[in-house]
Amino acid sequence: MNNCKYIFVTGGVTSSLGKGIISASLAKLLQARGYSVTIQKFDPYINIDPGTLNPYEHGECFVTEDGAETDLDLGHYERFLNVPTSQANNVTTGRIYQYVMDKEREGAFLGKTVQVIPHITDEIKRRMKLLGESGKYEIIITELGGTVGDIEALPYIEAVRQLKWELKPEDVMVIHLTLLPYLSTSQELKTKPTQHSVKMLLESGVQPDVLVCRAEHPISKEAKRKIALFCNVTQNSVIEALDMPTIYDVPMAMLKEKLDKTVLSRLKLSAKNDPDMDSWLNFLTRHKNPKHEVKIGLVGKYVELPDAYKSIAEAFIHAGAKNECKVKLEYIHSELITDENAKYKLGHLDGILVAPGFGDRGIDGKISAIKYAREKKVPFFGICLGMQVAVIEFGRNVLGFKDAHSTEMNAKTKHPVIDMMPDQKKITTKGGTMRLGAYACELAKDSKAYKAYEKTKITERHRHRYEFNGKFQKDYESNGMSITGINPDTKLAEIVEIKDHPFFMGVQFHPEYKSTVLNPHPLFVKFVKEAIAYSNS
């Protein structure tokens, strides 16, 4: 018998209130009390997944171990819980409708009119319960994307209403996240937007059990009493969520507000034990009391929206804490860098990271940045496209292949040092068809990568169509760029390094996806360490 408990997190008043962080923080506290927890995200857009979305539209596309292209909130879930997510943890309206329409074409609904209710809502409910029915988890937290009142969110709210009716009262609950805006003229927090948001949820037949209220100033007892009275919740179910210095402070703030205890009481679960947050507090202490400081430039073409590089930024926070170092990340637009201004743009940095991406916009600036890092012996780290551009730069400026390029940018180059993977050449559809998810890699023992990982066999997550062209391997290795990480099955080059450089590494995979608070990624830890050494020198 399935005894799984379901918690739904909805949002009201405005988007970007932090449903993902509240969900991850609550999950962390419940996990620290000894419960097995996972979080899933239901997104109301019609794309099948965010894989084909421009980062300006939706921020970073996060990739899971099993190769799902997902919402960036899944990155937060993994970073907080230190447990991998999967394909089942992110569902979109597009995926729901695609499944129902495929069933309709198969003849599963013969004679029936296929409708939003019951067919779409039934499929939403099935997906909501899927992880719970696996038997792996005691508590499933489901974050519903968007805001209550959005037309596209209505089928999800209706599915939650039905589940609240179908399951035992103690097996399902709703947490509603709202905003208490502060009016400086009257110097008070206004509760009316929260009341209206809850009223809108009630109109859909869903009564929230807990209200988490985002606010810039502490919420008075009188305001909490007023919210509780007009929103039909108990006073201790009105949770204050003040702005925090970092997202990693939120679990401790929610612990102080007793959100976990309120939730366990509502679900009729025992508190088991006090949450073991020692390692989390140790991380926060190291993060907030650094002994060093380094400036690292993140060179990319989506820098106007830092969320496009969310996992990289968080990986630097984890690695910084491990090294007791404050990493000051400077976002530098690759289109603004040239060979002539590279010293002015990059000369003050202790490390340079060239970020992932697609397309040829900003490529020349990335090449100039890498040339500067290579020649000036500045610690360099290239990820995915960053690794590919490092190969192009070396080909042009060391090997003398003046037209060296990737066939992604120049299909007619005589030196295609980066080329499309053979199994990608026949693929015509874009969505979900790249080399995605975790693949094995074997490390050379005399490499900096091996020193960082301290083992020869690793697995890392990928998201690419192009690869280092093995035809040029001898040219590169005989001139100082070594391939130090290789996929054992395909012999694909996964890591390149320059031996006579303090730290020059490009990786075809995305190490940032696997970095968590409790397990900072070894390559980021090593890169920050090298940046500290460079700064001190």
Image (cartoon, rainbow, N blue to C red):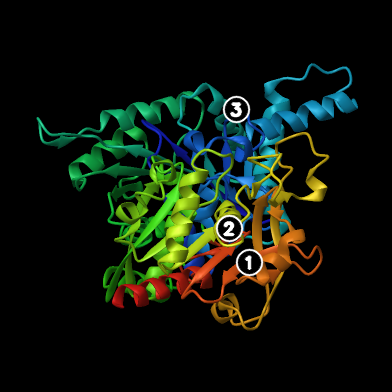
Residue identifier under label 3: 155
> x and y percent of residue 487 in the render?
74, 66
Amino acid on which disc 1 is placed: Ile
Label 3, secondary structure: give it: helix
Question: Callout 3 environment at 10 Å: few (<14), some (14 to 19), or many (20+)?
Answer: many
Residue 528 can be seen, yes or no: yes
> x and y percent of residue 186 in the render?
10, 31
Residue 45 has which mark? none
Label 1, secondary structure: give it: strand
User: Residue drawn 52% across and 21% down?
Assistant: 151
Residue nearer the viewer, 45 or 195: 45
Residue 25 can be seen, yes or no: no
- Asked if disc 3 and disc 1 are in contact, CB closer than 8 Å, the reply is no
Residue nearer the viewer, 130 or 51: 51
Quarter of the view holding residue 211: top left
- Asked if disc 1 and disc 2 are in contact, CB closer than 8 Å, the reply is yes
Residue 495 has which mark? 1
Residue 387 has which mark? 2
